[in-house]
Image (spheres, rainbow, N blue to C red):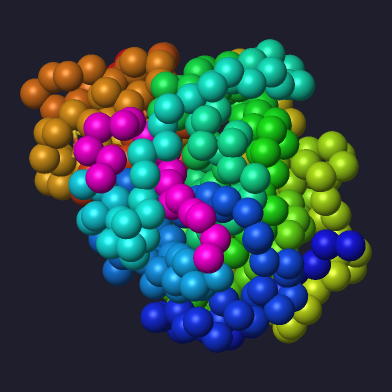
């Protein structure tokens, strides 16, 4: 039976913390892939990416146990991968085990949105995977944790294809679960020492929680995270669908929890309108109702990374990046990858104002 372990921890993460995890979950004896959340080249004190000290503690534990290992992720776009990993501190923390894992292999899937996908070869060939997500909100999918972090098993261009094939919140949430189900990780170790509330996964507000969560079931781990955020896990489309697919329990009473679980007081999650209004409607209405990103020119350095990474070419190179609202599918990849936080998610009122400006 799977379980979720919750315990206190701080940075730098100690070897004792990793030993505690492996006293509850069977440690790997075979080649292992450590999959952090390397969303982009964000400095670790911004708490967007998995903290390097957690990666380092895991790497040192596995290295001392004689386990062959690789550390790798597929952030949006392959360009400057090593530079981004260095800026996030994950490259240094990996102690020579960090690799480019973007080489892909075709995998047949059981999904309504795609019959096959290109998945990282390293992911498919690694007999044991340790998923190391961050405890964060997500303005499109409400939460991002263990399940969403496995979207990174797809090289960049493949992620764009999924965004185009599954456009509404409900569709995209199901597609994420379909990707997760290709290769569910054996162990999930979640960095919840500094978490993110508000408009995650990159523009939210860091907040101290001082916890590490670990589980051999990513769906149950995410359900615990959602509960701690003050959400009903059934309200999160990704979790509800994963549960219906038989991938894990999401009722807190049905999850074996080792440690104290408490709701975080006044934790800010993205607008509940997403959950209660947009989720049940079709992609056509979703397109109409969803807010679109807005540019803060004061922060923009005109690197045009967002233009290159937009999966539907809704951003054009101009004096500054220019948005085509009709083409935009509100995936917020541009907000995620902008390392200057120049792409923002506007309030609904501000979005309405932007919409009127275009008329
Ligand atoms: S919004 Fe961000 S990613 Fe896009 S051009 Fe400006 S700085 Fe670069
Ligand atoms: S403009 Fe941004 S939010 Fe819109 S589709 Fe492109 S990447 Fe996604």
Specify start and end residues of the magenta stretch as a single range.
66-82
- Which residue is painted at 65% across and 61% down in the image? 28
Which residue occupies the foreground of this view, 156 or 321? 156
Q: Position of residue 229 (x, y in %)?
A: 63, 66
The quadrant of the picture showing ligand 1 is top left
Locate the N terminus and report the quarter of the image it occupies.
Answer: bottom right
Q: Is residue 23 visible?
A: yes
- The verdict on residue 72 being magenta is yes
Q: Is residue 103 above or below residue 263?
A: above
Answer with left or right where residue 300 lies relative to residue 218: left
In this view, the residue in front, 93 or 335, is 93
Which SS type dominates the magenta stretch? loop
Query: In which quarter of the view is residue 240 placed?
Result: top right
> Which of these two is toward me, 142 or 121?
121
Percent coordinates x, y for residue 124 in the rendering = 60, 34
> Image quadrant for the C terminus?
top left
Residue 70 is inside the magenta segment: yes
Q: Position of residue 37 (x, y in %)?
A: 45, 52
Q: Position of residue 226 (x, y in %)?
A: 67, 60
Determine the residue positioned at 28% across, 62% down: 92
> Going 56% across and 52% down the picture, which residue do you hit?
32
Q: Nearer the viewer, residue 225 or 9?
A: 9
Question: Residue at image x 23%, y 56%?
Answer: 87
Q: Quadrant of residue 305?
A: top left
On the question of residue 261 being in view, the answer is no
């Amino acid at each position: 039976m799977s379980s979720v372990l919750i315990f206190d921890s701080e940075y730098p993460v100690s070897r004792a913390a990793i030993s505690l995890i492996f006293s509850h979950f069977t440690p790997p004896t075979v080649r292992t892939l450590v999959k952090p959340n390397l969303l982009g080249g964000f400095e670790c004190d911004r708490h967007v990416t998995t903290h390097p000290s957690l990666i380092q503690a895991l790497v040192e534990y596995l290295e001392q146990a004689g386990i062959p290992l690789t550390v790798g992720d597929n952030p949006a776009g392959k360009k400057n991968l090593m530079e981004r990993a260095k800026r996030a501190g994950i490259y240094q923390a990996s102690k020579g085990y960090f690799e480019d894992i973007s080489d892909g292999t075709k995998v047949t899937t059981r999904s309504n949105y795609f019959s096959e996908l290109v998945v990282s070869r390293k992911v498919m060939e690694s007999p044991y995977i340790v998923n190391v997500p961050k405890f964060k909100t997500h303005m499109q999918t409400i939460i991002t944790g263990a399940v969403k972090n496995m979207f990174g098993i797809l090289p960049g261009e493949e992620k764009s294809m999924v965004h185009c094939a599954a456009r509404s919140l409900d569709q995209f949430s199901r597609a994420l679960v379909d990707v997760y189900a290709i290769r569910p990780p054996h162990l999930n170790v979640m960095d919840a020492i500094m978490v993110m509330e508000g408009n995650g996964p990159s523009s939210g507000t860091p907040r101290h929680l001082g916890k590490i969560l670990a589980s051999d079931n990513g769906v149950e781990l995410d359900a615990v995270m959602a509960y701690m955020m003050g959400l009903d896990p059934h309200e999160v489309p990704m979790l509800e669908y994963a549960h219906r697919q038989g991938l894990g329990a999401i009722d807190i009473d049905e999850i074996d929890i080792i440690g104290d679980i408490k709701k975080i007081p006044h934790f800010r999650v993205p607008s509940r309108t997403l959950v209660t209004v947009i989720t049940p409607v079709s992609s056509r209405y979703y397109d109409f109702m969803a807010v679109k990103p807005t540019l803060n020119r004061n922060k923009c350095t005109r690197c045009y990374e967002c233009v290159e990474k937009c999966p539907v070419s809704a951003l054009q190179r101009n004096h500054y990046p220019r948005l085509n609202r009709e083409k935009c599918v509100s995936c917020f990849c541009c907000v995620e990858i902008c390392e200057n936080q120049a792409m923002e998610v506007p309030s609904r009122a501000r979005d309405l104002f932007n919409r009127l400006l275009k008329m």
